[in-house]
Amino acid sequence: MSLDAVSAAELIAWYAEMGVTEALDETPHDHFAAAPEPARQPVARPQVAAQQARRPVAVATATPPDEAALSARALAREATTLDALKTALASFEGCPLKATAKNLVFADGNPAAKVMFVGEAPGADEDRIGLPFVGRSGQLLDRMLAAIGLNRQEHVYIANLLPWRPPGNRTPTPQEVAICLPFIQRQIELVDPDILVCIGGPSAQGLLGVSGILASRGRWMEYDTGKRMIRAIATLHPAYLLRQPLQKRLAWRDLRVLKAALDAL
Ligand code: URA
């Protein structure tokens, strides 16, 4: 490979790492250039305008967030198994993130596990593969689990607050969270774990109603699954730990607290 090809490959890998995964256009645009004059619309003759007004217009409107959240709640409630919930999510058109995501990322791990982890939303790798936490932060999560003797195939069930990737890995908006919340709440109810672990701030805020992950992590809270009250704890997101490795000592404390609770079950 020539040096240029190597640098180009490195540049593309860096873009992917930064979350830039969509090529928007092939030619550069000068966005500072003066905008062209809008083309003048011909004045419609009165009877043509009247005909046009009668014709139904096909406009692609997004479902208003409140309506989408209501329909999500109804769909989630109807699902009585995890498979039915996944099918319901796959047919749900109320969340705009679905349009830009490649895959629905539903869950991984053992649905009979005693502990359920809920992250924020899929990243680029998860979106491509269709499974949660398979990228760099997922690999760190696996190592964190292994440190307390757990593996994802046997001991844990993993999902996300949102099942579709926000473009460029941006933080989900409050509307997107509100729309998708009934699905993850139902997923937790159906899995019925003994312990819920919220990974990162948005998950802790969405499911436990706490803000400020550094202040709320590492202490036991209660979560109502709809069937029963279970123990819940928030911890730091592995993506954050990759950027702030010194904070791993806090995550390690949380893991030890989790391990003690699991041993006591
Ligand atoms: N970050 C998350 O919160 N979830 C994933 O699945 C991957 C990265």
Image (cartoon, rainbow, N blue to C red):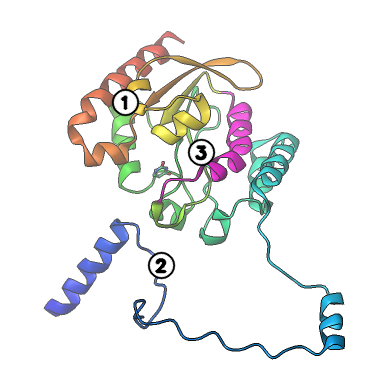
Determine if the C-beta at disc 3 is less than 8 A from ligand 1.
yes
Residue 22 tag number = 2
Q: Quadrant of residue 243?
A: top left
Magenta stretch, residue numbers: 170-192
Q: Which residue is mark 1?
A: 214
Q: Who is closer to the viewer here, 145 or 65?
A: 65
Residue 26 lies, in percent from the top left, at 38, 81
Task: Look at 31% across and 37% down and name the residue there.
Answer: 238
- SS at mark 1? helix
Viewer can see residue 152:
no
**How many numbered marks appear?**
3
- Residue 183 magenta: yes
Is 156 on the left or on the right of 11, as rendered? right
Residue 157 lies, in percent from the top left, at 49, 32
Ligand 1 shown in quarter: top left
Residue 161 tag number = 3
Amino acid carrying mark 1 in the image? Leu
Which circle's residue, 3 or 1, is located before the other in the chain?
A: 3
Whole-number angstrom distance, CA of label 3 to CA of label 2:
23 Å
Q: Residues within 10 Å of mark 2 (few under 14, many from 20)?
A: few
Amino acid carrying mark 3 in the image? Leu
Residue 192 lies, in percent from the top left, at 59, 24
Is 176 on the left or on the right of 252, as rendered? right
Which circle's residue, 1 or 2, is located before the other in the chain?
A: 2
Task: Look at 56% across and 44% down and name the residue there.
Answer: 175
Q: Quadrant of residue 255?
A: top left
